[in-house]
C-alpha cells in the first residue's frame, strides 16, 4: 500500500515540477516577445522622403477631387473678381529641416496654372502646379522643394499664375540656411 502512495506522491511532484517549468518558459516567451516589440533600435525615425512625397501627392489629389466634386453652380455668388495685379497673389514660405514649402493665396483665380521659378546666382529651379479653386481664395496645388536641392543663401522666388490670357507674376525671397 505504501508503494502505491509513494508512486502517487512522485507523480504529484513530477506534475508540479512540470507546471513550474512550463510557467517559467511561458514567462520567458512573453518577455522575449515584448522585448522585440519595444526595442527602440528597430523603430523608424519617421517617414522616408518617398513617403512624405507620396503623402503630399495624396493630399493634393484629395483636395483637387473634393474641389472637382463641388461645381461652381452649387456655390452661387462665390466666383471671385478677375485678378488685375500682383496684389492678387500672396506667397508664404516655410523652411524646416528637410524642405522649403511655398504656399500661395490667389484672389480672383478660378483655374489655371502656376509656375514657380527659384533663382540663386546661376542656379535656377522651376516647378509647376495647377490652380486649385476654392470659394474664398484659390491656391497653387503646392510646392515643396527638398533643402538639399538648394544651396544656402537667399533665393529669389517668381510665381507666375496664368488663367486664360491673364498672367500675373509675384516676386518674393526666401533664405535657406
Image (spheres, grey):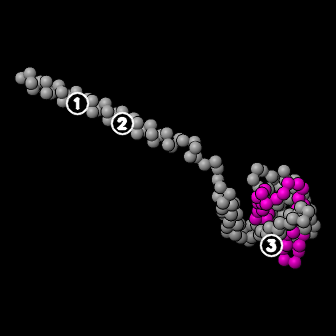
Mark closer to the observer (3, 2):
2
What is the residue that sits farthest to the top in this orientation? 2
- Magenta span: chief secondary structure: strand
- Residue reaching furthest bottom? 165
Left or right of 176: which side holds 11? Answer: left
Closer to the N terminus: mark 3 or mark 1? 1
Label 1, secondary structure: give it: helix
> Which one is in front in this view, the residue at disc 3 or the one at disc 1?
1
Q: Mark 2 points at which residue?
A: 25
Q: Earlier in the sequence, mark 3 or mark 2?
A: 2
Q: Nearer the viewer, residue 98 or 89?
A: 98
Mark 2 Cα shell of 10 Å, populated few (<14), some (14-19), many (≥20): few
User: Start and end of the magenta stretch?
Assistant: 139-168
Q: Where is residue 127 in the image (x, y as percent from the top left)?
A: 80, 67
Callout 3 secondary element: loop
Label 1 packing within 10 angstroms: few (<14), some (14-19), many (20+): few
Q: Distance between the residues labelled 3 and 1?
A: 83 Å
Q: Which mark, residue 14?
A: 1
Query: Going by the image, does 171 lie left or right of 32?
Result: right
Whether residues under marks 3 and 1 lie with C-beta atoms below 8 angstroms apart, the answer is: no
Q: Position of residue 26 (x, y in %)?
A: 37, 37
Cβ atoms under marks 3 and 2 closer than 8 Å: no
Q: Residue at x 84, y 74 (%)?
A: 163
Q: Alpha carbon of mark 2 to alpha carbon of mark 1: how far?
A: 16 Å
Amino acid at each position: 500500500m505504501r508503494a502505491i502512495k509513494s508512486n502517487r506522491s512522485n507523480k504529484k511532484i513530477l506534475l508540479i515540477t512540470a507546471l513550474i517549468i512550463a510557467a517559467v518558459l511561458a514567462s520567458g516567451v512573453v518577455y522575449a516577445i515584448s522585448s522585440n516589440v519595444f526595442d527602440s533600435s528597430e523603430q523608424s525615425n519617421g517617414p522616408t522622403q518617398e513617403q512624405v512625397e507620396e503623402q503630399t501627392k495624396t493630399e493634393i489629389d484629395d483636395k483637387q477631387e473634393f474641389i472637382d466634386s463641388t461645381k461652381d453652380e452649387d456655390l452661387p455668388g462665390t466666383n471671385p473678381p478677375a485678378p488685375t495685379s500682383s496684389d492678387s497673389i500672396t506667397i508664404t514660405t516655410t523652411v524646416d529641416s528637410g524642405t522649403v514649402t511655398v504656399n500661395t493665396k490667389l484672389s480672383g483665380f478660378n483655374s489655371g496654372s502656376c509656375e514657380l521659378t527659384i533663382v540663386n546666382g546661376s542656379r535656377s529651379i522651376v516647378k509647376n502646379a495647377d490652380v486649385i479653386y476654392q470659394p474664398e481664395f484659390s491656391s497653387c496645388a503646392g510646392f515643396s522643394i527638398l533643402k538639399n536641392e538648394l544651396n544656402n543663401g537667399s533665393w529669389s522666388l517668381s510665381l507666375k499664375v496664368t488663367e486664360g490670357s491673364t498672367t500675373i507674376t509675384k516676386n518674393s525671397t526666401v533664405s535657406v540656411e
